[in-house]
Image (cartoon, grey):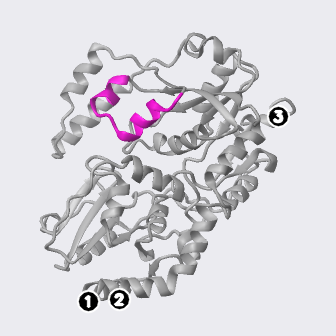
Amino acid sequence: MSKKKNINIIFIIQREKKLGNKDIDHYLPFLYFLSKSNDYNFTAKGFFFESKDKYLKNIDPRFKLLSNLKNVELVFLYKENFLNKVIQFLIRKDDSILAKLFNIVTNKLLKIRKKNFDWKSELGHKFINSNTLLVFTLSANSNTSKIFYDIKKYNKRAKWIVLPHGTIICDNKMIMENHLDKDEIIKHDEIYDQVDYFVKTSERDLEHGILHGLKKDKIIVIGSPRYCKEWLNIKLTLGLDGKEVSANSNYKIKILFLVPKKHINIFSEELIRTIDFISSYQEFELILLNNNYDFPKLPKYILNRDNIRYYLLSKKYSTSKLIDWADIVFHAGTGVIFESFMKEKITVLPRYLSCNTLISDKYNAGFNISNRDELREFCNMAADSLQDLINIYNTKHSLANKKFIDDFVHANTISVPQNITEAISFIIENLKTFKK
């Protein structure tokens, strides 16, 4: 039996003020599968641009697993001070408008942070002298570049690898509401020249990277660790998704609506009308899962309906548990939708809610509804018989759904965990010969 190779890993977590602990969601399966590899032993340090108190108050199962992985040390770069403790104490937990405004102000105060760190001390002797130091980030921009080169000052052999923080979900290019350029501009991003390797989830992401100036030999396609079947099974076994969603037997059909972000070309008024229409069915219980506090602004008569529940992302239930709860999942543009397809939920895209063209629509994956007439037809079918709807869905869409998942979750390979090990092997083998 060949001896395991030793590697040293640094991973950077920056976005933990956002709802959902998204960075942990992307790092954890990658590190977990690597820890089970027969080829490597790794020692890792995760640098959080956050204070430790935030995590100790509410220990998330995912954070707990990350902190318990063998040879993984978590370092919190922001130290608690008296002012921050007072602000955290004052932050209100209710959902009133006054509370939201107060929380916005106090969170701005919390952003006043120290920008320079003693990286020599934080890294320590082992990482400074490592011949196989891999620095992982989830983005490539001026902030992550500065962090990497601050680390590289103390270890010239360090290599920068960007892991996927998502995948392409739109077929069109002008996907944001402020994308109004008259000519398509394909810019070579100079930051691409600084990164040693980009790990991508799909061949489509690889092609997109090459189009924007990435060299093909810098790109490694592995599929999606976050949504692959192996990780979904592990999450279920280890209880990483938290508590079950409370059930209500008064309703025949459970519907989860993943409310889109406003800036991705969403027609807000039509979104409200769609929510109004779905919730008008007394057979349905509707849960709205929102990414922010104030979009969309639903009229009181809708919010006051007994068959509507409204949750902020990861505040009461995890998205995974809400998908488990649902019979039907509506979406209009989110990477989380891959989990709905993986769990074989009836997945519905009201394409008329956005002027974007989603990849799932191009694949004909899920029910793709063009207007409110088709929405009415769908809702009436669901109200008449969920089982008949399931049968129709499986007959019409199972092949398209499988193709969609194979391309964007599994990268048309047998094992995403094995792809992770092979990606690291490829990087390690090229450490001595790689030239920028």
Q: Residue 389, located in which quarter of the rendered image?
A: bottom left
Q: Which labelled disc corresponds to residue 384?
A: 1
Give, as a single range, the part of the protein colored magenta: 52-70
Nearer the observer, 394 or 312: 394
Nearer the observer, 224 or 80: 224
- Work out which residue is located at the far right of the displayed protein and give it: 433
Identify residue type, mark 2. Asp
Marks 2 and 1, how far apart at CA: 8 Å
Magenta stretch containing residue 365, yes or no? no
Tags 2 and 3 in contact by the CB under 8 Å rule? no
Pinpoint residue 227: horizontal percent, then vertical percent. 51, 56
Tags 3 and 1 in contact by the CB under 8 Å rule? no
At x 50%, y 52%, the residue is 231
Question: What residue would you read off at disc 2?
Answer: 388
Q: Which labelled disc corresponds to residue 436?
A: 3
Query: Crowding near pointer 1: few (<14 within 10 Å), some, many (20+)?
Result: few
Position above or below: 256 against 351 = above
Pinpoint residue 285: horizontal percent, then vertical percent. 21, 71
Tags 2 and 1 in contact by the CB under 8 Å rule? yes
